Amino acid sequence: MGLARASGAVLDGVRGVLIDIEVHVGPGLPSVGIVGLPGASVNEARWRIRSAIQNSGYPWPDSRVTVSLAPSELPKHGAGLDLPMALAILASSGRIPGHCLVGVALIGELALDGGVRPVRGALALALGLVERGCRSVIVPHDNATECAVVPGVEIFAVDSLAAALRTLAGEGVPVRADDVVHDDHHSHLDLQDVQGQSQARWALEIAAAGGHHLLLLGNPGVGKTMLAERLPGILPDLDDESTREVTAIHSVAGLTHDRMVRRPPFQAPHCSASSAAVLGSVRRSGVVPGAVTLAHRGVLFLDEAPEFDRDVLEGLRQPMESRAIAIHRAGWLGSLPADVQMVLAANPCPCGHYNQAVTDSCLCRSDRIRAYQSRISGPVRSRLDLGVNMHALGAASLDSEDTRSVRDRVWEARVRAAHRLGRFGVSLNCRVPGRILTDELSVDPGAQDTVTELADLGMRGLHRCLRVAWSIADLRAHERPTRDDVREAVDFYRAAQQVGVP
Amino acid sequence: MTEHSTRSSIAPKDALGAYGEGLAAEFLRGQGMVILHRNWRCEVGEIDVVARDGDALVICEVKTRRSVSHGTPLEAVGRRKLGKLRHLALRYVTEQRIGPRVIRFDVVGVIQPWDGPPIVQHVRNV
């Protein structure tokens, strides 16, 4: 009979939150009470824990068991609290010494036979525990590799309740970080497969160098989708911190549980996707990240952008600007990371044939063309940095550069940008605050007149043009944007803004 | 045991129950309580033991088991049984014309293995 404590963690959005578990085994008829907003799966833990404890050779206390989960106002979902709850019950009923649960946190779902099952989002949970000062974490064996990359913490892997008890007794060996499997597999999609389209390829390269949003316009079959799918290929690998962030999100979504995501993710939701699927939603079982969060630090591609629901497109305005998506629902208030580079592809008209270079067979009325193009609204367009009109090719096949050489050039441009921008605390051109663009970074004296002519674009447009101009300069190894660099950036920007029949 | 049941009309499980209730009553008396009734019946059901502990009226349920292989005796007293006990207690105080006083509900669990001495567990104020 007594009191015991253990530490566990639950997910709040895509973050792990430390949970203090207190167990009191006291007088009363045998029963288990769990307080502190347990969700359905946490409430069911009583049955799993009881069987797991009995099947591990320990008796179940024949008295009243009260489990308190703090902070009590946070709703708790998932079965990851099974393991710490079971050990706290053993400690409070005197089966194991309570002091061995001090300074260690546990994550794991229990099977009835006493085995420990993997949980969703283990990496996010472990990161949350470390943030709160935990220095040693016991995790399910199947989650060990993803958790091993967390810096400053010892990770112990267990496959059963008995193994967890041995580890607590000091017999465990921490998992080593060099056992981690990195998923740095490059896509088999190569830029070489895209014939011609030099202007669009150049826009793709600029977008990759500076992290700019891109709009691809063109008739069906012209290669918009092919090109967009090859953008992640020319982006550099994620750095260590981004790798942890992205892998934690993917782990929460159940996309990975044993390897680290090294390559920028690519998400291409279908145009019938709901706003919940793209922007994220809240269910009774917790927060479900949307495609925009799964594409964090990578590319979100909207093929047939005008066909998307209006609230999806408009909802993406916020992440395009602030790199996070706010979710305000009855069950949850907060924001999920959504630092994405957007690529939108669109046909020029409902039938798709308008503005075709070879034979103009479009039958759409001009007002319908305008209406179709306006479905990508002005506020969304004004956040797009680059627009390209792609045209069908003749029969002549053209030599195209491969992904590797473009990626090398993008890398060099990014190094140049990072070197210049380091003192402002950013590394990509798309992140440079407007004030620094106008006051601290000056374009080439020859380009100054061109910049002053851009008053009609408005402040946001001007800043976006300048950011793109810097990316073009970085790719061309110019010290600062020249007149041609700025003009080209402005042309790309205006192409993204243009709506309707010229 | 079989021999016993052929001679008497009492089923073995009822005999065990009666034996357990006897043990429980002894135990409660040992705790300083005064036994008022055993097996008090009305049309709603039966109270195993009614006792007085100081000023409090104690309504006591007794559960007896041979082993814990199908759960402990204490576990067998669920929410529904406790609800019924409350109901019975109300009937008891009405019929016995007992004035307002503290009513306490206790449970006594008796484990009587086939071989060896009985184990008595007493939970107060459930």
Image (cartoon, grey):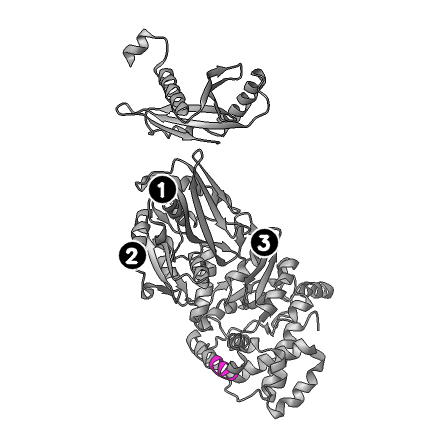
* Amino acid found under the numbered disc labelled 2: Gly
Please report the residue visible at 66 percent of the width from the left and 73 percent of the height from the top: A497
Residue A35 visible to the viewer: yes
Please report the residue visible at 31 percent of the width from the left and 8 percent of the height from the top: B6
Q: Nearer the viewer, residue A438 or A84?
A: A84
Sequence-wise, the earlier of marks 2 and 1 is 1
Q: Chain of mark 1?
A: A
Q: Which residue is mark 1?
A: A52
Q: Nearer the viewer, residue B94 or A329?
A: B94
- Residue A40 appears at what percent x and percent y? 50, 43
Please report the residue visible at 28 percent of the width from the left and 23 percent of the height from the top: B114
| Above or below A328: residue A185 | below
Q: Quadrant of the N terminus of chain A?
A: top left
Magenta-highlighted residues: A414-420
Q: Which SS class for mark 1?
A: helix
Sequence-wise, the earlier of marks 3 and 2 is 2
Is A283 displayed left or right of A188 in the figure? Answer: right
Residue B53 covered by magenta stretch: no
Name, please, the residue furthest toward the top. B7
Q: Chain of mark 3?
A: A
Q: Which residue is mark 3?
A: A332
Per the model, the C-alpha gap separating discs 1 and 3 is: 33 Å
Is A109 displayed left or right of B89 in the figure? Answer: left
Residue at mark 1 shares a chain with residue at mark 3: yes
Q: Nearer the viewer, mark 1 or mark 3?
A: 1
Name, please, the residue furthest toward the left. B115
Q: Which residue is mark 2?
A: A172
Query: In the picture, residue A356 is in which quadrant?
Result: bottom right
Q: Nearer the viewer, mark 3 or mark 2?
A: 2
* Amino acid found under the numbered disc labelled 1: Ala
Sequence-wise, the earlier of marks 1 and 3 is 1
Q: Residues within 10 Å of mark 2 (few under 14, many from 20)?
A: some
